């Protein structure tokens, strides 16, 4: 939030009652020069059925791209004046980019969507219909993810199972960031102060009336995925540790079991020595016990460390992202802090 105290963001309550409704597509982009024009062409075609009574804002969040992404987006404004662009000062990652998008979205509803057309824009028409029927959140569920590699599918499946087993607020499987969020929901999410962001979990944490539409997830239209398995692993850890304290609590029970076990074993050793005298040297059992307890201690410390690290990031109060410049729709340059 702190990074987004942007005076250019409008106060929606003060606009006239007769205003046309607007949806903001939030499109985080990181080195996507090849995908942008294709995305805009396909999406504006797909949104045709929505007709003229709904405005669309294409809000790109340039997540520190090092290629021509920014230039391509600005050039596209000639053909699509509905484009707005937030340039971040470096690559902050998709989650931070999404938060920047939510903070700058001016629409009555916001839809985070990937630029690679893996979130088919045709689904938006269904989403808007459900939204107009009164839903505050419209999730888009992937019916199949054939386009993903088996490794991605298995790891994603395992992650969702583990996450939902641990978290207090489960996230629906097969629903990504692609969904429609009503203005009320967007405001609720933007008001959350935490710094380690795992948006999927925040979206379900805030609640509100939620419905679902289904779609098939196609393969990437252009360019390459920017997610490495290492990045996904870090995101998964963020998700789990941000949403749940169960990993901490597990150690209460493991510790308790171990303590009772050790007590019984000590008693056994004590009485055996009393009754049968000193035995042969117990090298193996000693080493095994040291190793097991040492390993468990390290692991438990690691888990605690995960939380301490997160407490540290929260305490530092750094902004989630830094805006280098903001090009609002229809305004030539509303950049701030140089741009
Ligand atoms: N993205 C981003 N910052 C990053 C990585 C990715 O803004 O650090 C954007 C990317 O440009 C795309 C979206 O996030 O619009 C989804 O990325 P990608 O298609 O690589 O992920 P996948 O579909 O494999 O989950
Ligand atoms: Mg993709």
Image: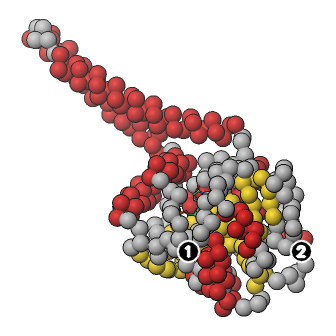
Local packing at callout 1 (Cα closer than 10 Å; few below 14, some 14-19, many 20+) is: many
The label nearer to you, 2 versus 1, is 1
Q: Secondary structure at mark 1?
A: loop
Q: Could you say where residue 143 lies in the image, as x and y percent from the top left?
A: 44, 77
Q: Which residue is mark 1?
A: 117
Residue 176 or residue 121, whichever sits in front: 121
Locate residue 27, reporting x and y percent.
65, 67
Identity of the residue drawn at 75% across and 78% down: 80
Q: Quadrant of the C terminus?
A: bottom right
Q: Which residue is mark 2?
A: 15
Q: Is residue 194 above or below residue 156?
A: above
Residue at the image point whose x is 38% and y is 37% from the top: 253
- Residue drawn at the location 64% of the way across and 54% of the way down: 66
Crowdedness of circle 2 by 10 Å Cα count: few (<14), some, many (20+)? Answer: few
Q: Nearer the viewer, residue 327 or 210?
A: 327
Q: Secondary structure at mark 2?
A: loop
Q: Residue 205 at what x, y percent from top left? A: 60, 60
- Image coloring type: secondary structure
Q: Which residue is located at x 41 percent, y 75 percent?
A: 144
Let me know if residue 118 appears in the view. Answer: no
Q: Position of residue 251 (x, y in %)?
A: 41, 36
Q: Quadrant of residue 69?
A: bottom right
The outermost residue toward the top is: 277
Q: Quadrant of ligand 1?
A: bottom right
Q: Could you tell whether 12 is left or right of 271 in the image?
A: right
């Amino acid at each position: 939030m702190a990074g987004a105290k942007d005076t250019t963001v409008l106060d929606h309550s003060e606009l006239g009652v007769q205003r046309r409704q607007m949806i903001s597509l939030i499109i985080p982009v990181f080195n996507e020069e090849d995908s942008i024009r294709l995305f805009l062409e396909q999406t504006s075609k797909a949104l045709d059925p929505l007709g003229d009574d709904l405005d669309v804002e294409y809000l790109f969040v340039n997540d520190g791209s090092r290629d021509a992404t920014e230039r391509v987006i600005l050039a596209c404004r000639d053909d699509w004046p509905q484009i707005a662009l937030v340039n971040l000062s470096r690559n902050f990652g998709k989650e931070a980019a999404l938060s920047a998008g939510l903070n700058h979205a001016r629409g009555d509803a916001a839809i985070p969507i990937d630029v690679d057309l893996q979130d088919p824009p045709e689904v938006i028409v269904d989403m808007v219909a459900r939204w107009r029927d009164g839903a505050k959140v419209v999730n888009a569920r992937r019916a199949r993810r054939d386009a993903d590699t088996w490794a991605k599918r298995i790891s994603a499946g395992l992650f969702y199972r583990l996450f939902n087993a641990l978290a207090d607020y489960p996230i629906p499987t097969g629903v990504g960031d692609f969904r429609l969020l009503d203005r009320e929901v967007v405001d609720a999410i933007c008001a959350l102060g935490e710094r380690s962001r795992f948006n999927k979990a925040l979206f379900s944490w805030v609640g509100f009336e939620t419905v679902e539409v289904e779609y098939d997830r196609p393969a990437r239209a252009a360019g390459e995925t920017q997610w490495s398995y290492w990045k996904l692993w870090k995101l998964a850890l963020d998700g789990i540790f941000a949403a749940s304290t169960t990993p901490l609590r597990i150690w209460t029970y493991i510790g308790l079991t171990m303590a009772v076990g050790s007590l019984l074993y000590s008693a056994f050793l004590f009485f055996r020595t009393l009754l049968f005298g000193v035995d042969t040297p117990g090298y193996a059992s000693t080493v095994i016990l040291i190793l097991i307890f040492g390993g468990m201690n390290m692991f438990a410390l690691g888990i605690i460390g995960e939380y301490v690290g997160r407490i540290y990031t929260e305490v530092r109060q750094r902004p989630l992202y830094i805006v280098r410049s903001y090009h609002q729709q229809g305004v030539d340059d509303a950049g701030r802090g140089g741009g």
